[in-house]
Every structure is written in C-alpha cells, then in structure tokens.
Image (spheres, rainbow, N blue to C red):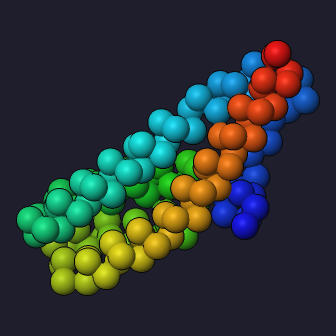
Amino acid sequence: MPAMTVLMTLTLPSSVLRGARRRVASVLPYNLDHVAIAVNDLDAAIDETKGELVRRAAHTLKSDSATLGASRLSALSKHLEELGRLDSLAPAPGVLAEIREALVPVRMALEELREDYADRAAGIDG
C-alpha cells in the first residue's frame, strides 16, 4: 500500500533548501519511536486501570498521529482519551487492539517515506 494512502500527502515546496529530505528522513524515526512509546504507555495505564494515565498517553498518541496525518489512528486515540477522561476503561483494551491494528500501515508508510526521503537526499546531496 503506497505511503500516501495511509498518511496525508507530505509535500515540500519547490524552493526547499538542499538537504531538506535528509532532515525529514531523520525526523521520521523519532516519530515512530514516539508513537511506540505512547502505545506502550497506554498498555501500562490500561493494565493499571488508571484513567488519567490513559487520557494523557492517548492524548499524546492522538496529537502525534494527527501530526503525521494518520487520521484513523488519531480518531481511535481520541476515543481512548475520552474513555480515560471519563475513567470508563472497560472498552479500553478493545480500542487499544484497534490502535495496534491501525498502527501497522502507519508504521509501514513512515518507513517507506523515511527510505524514500533518504534515497532522494542521497541523490540530491550526494
């Protein structure tokens, strides 16, 4: 599945400085790591049945997902954030399972973008 079908189209202006693709490629692994940390935090908070911790971790994941353009992941995170706010965690494990499912194509798309930007940067800056 092409990366752009999962994430919003990431476009760079034609006037972008040389090396911009390399910078984008260097940021993508951070985003992947940040999302993974948020999912792990959610898992722990749900296990501990701590609504406020679920809310905070889900909020982080919602924001990171929205920034990446992963709208389904962001919407699921928003739902989990609301469950945490209400301290109504019974459905939370199911929502977390959906988040993990939604994360698979996002992770693949980010890796594809990272490789694409790195390849292009090597060709431009090489």
Judge whether 114 appears above or below 36 on screen. above
Based on the displayed image, in which of its 4 quarters is residue 13 positioned? top right
Q: Residue at x 91, y 29 (%)?
A: 14
Is residue 111 in view from this perspective? yes
Judge whether 120 appears above or below 92 on screen. above
Q: Residue at x 26, y 83 (%)?
A: 91
Q: Residue at x 31, y 82 (%)?
A: 94
Q: Is residue 96 left or right of residue 110?
A: left
Q: Position of residue 27 (x, y in %)?
A: 56, 32
Q: Nearer the viewer, residue 79 or 48?
A: 48
Based on the displayed image, in which of its 4 quarters is residue 18 positioned? top right
Is residue 69 in view from this perspective? no
Q: Quadrant of the N terminus?
A: bottom right
Q: Is residue 31 left or right of residue 120?
A: left
Q: Nearer the viewer, residue 1 or 102?
A: 1
Q: Tag count in the figure?
A: 0
Q: Position of residue 79 (x, y in %)?
A: 38, 73
Based on the displayed image, in which of its 4 quarters is residue 108 positioned? bottom right
Q: Quadrant of the C terminus?
A: top right
Q: Is residue 36 left or right of residue 86?
A: right
The furthest residue to the right:
14
Q: Residue at x 48, y 36 (%)?
A: 30
